[in-house]
């Protein structure tokens, strides 16, 4: 009778490869790079999904509300506070970068 040995490292490697194969079909390591023109009224919002749609109900509507707040002068703390007040179990973080003509 032939003895079969399965090393723990081999089991781990097999599971790791299966996990990566599954996620590599969904995720990409290639960045999306865009060029856009900015002016003195331009801004960039970098935030977690919890800042844009804390209740996970309507991302587009909630994201538009965040943009309107920033257009009206809201800062990142205001965006975070807005999301935290809504019923969310999600994490919330936000950074707003504003451009100015200099």
Image (spheres, grey):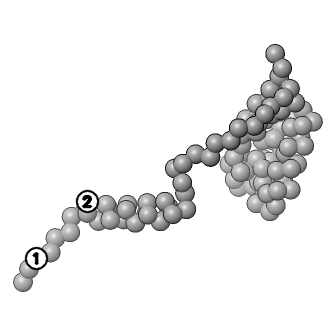
Q: Which comes sooner in the sequence, label 1 or label 2?
A: 1
Specify whether 18 is left or right of 89: left
Tag on residue 36? Answer: none
How far across and how far down the image is residue 50, in percent? 73, 50
State the residue in front, 52 or 27.
27
Q: Which residue is mark 1?
A: 3
Q: Residue at x 55, y 57 (%)?
A: 27
Q: Residue at x 36, y 65 (%)?
A: 15
Residue furthest out toward the right? 72
Q: Quadrant of the N terminus?
A: bottom left
Q: Residue at x 20, y 69 (%)?
A: 6
Task: Measure the alpha-carbon separation of dots 1 and 2.
Answer: 18 Å
How far across and how far down the image is residue 100, in percent? 83, 22
SS assignment at label 2? helix
Above or below: residue 61 compared with residue 40:
below
Above or below: residue 88 compared with residue 102:
below
Above or below: residue 49 compared with residue 77:
below
Tag on residue 9? Answer: 2
Looking at the image, can residue 87 be seen?
A: no
How far across and how far down the image is residue 44, in percent? 76, 36
Residue furthest out toward the left? 1
> Splitting the image into 4 quarters, where does residue 68 fall?
top right
State the residue in front, 2 or 98.
98
Q: Quadrant of the C terminus?
A: top right
Q: Residue at x 87, y 30 (%)?
A: 41
């Amino acid at each position: 009778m032939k003895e079969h040995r399965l090393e723990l490292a081999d089991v781990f490697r097999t599971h790791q490869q299966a996990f990566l194969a599954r996620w590599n079909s969904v995720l990409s390591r290639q960045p999306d790079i865009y060029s856009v023109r900015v002016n003195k009224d331009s801004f960039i919002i970098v935030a977690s999904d919890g800042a844009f749609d804390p209740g996970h109900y309507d991302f587009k509507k909630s994201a538009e509300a965040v943009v309107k707040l920033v257009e009206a002068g809201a800062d990142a703390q205001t965006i975070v506070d807005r999301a935290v007040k809504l019923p969310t179990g999600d994490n919330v973080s936000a950074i707003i970068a504003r451009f100015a003509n200099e």
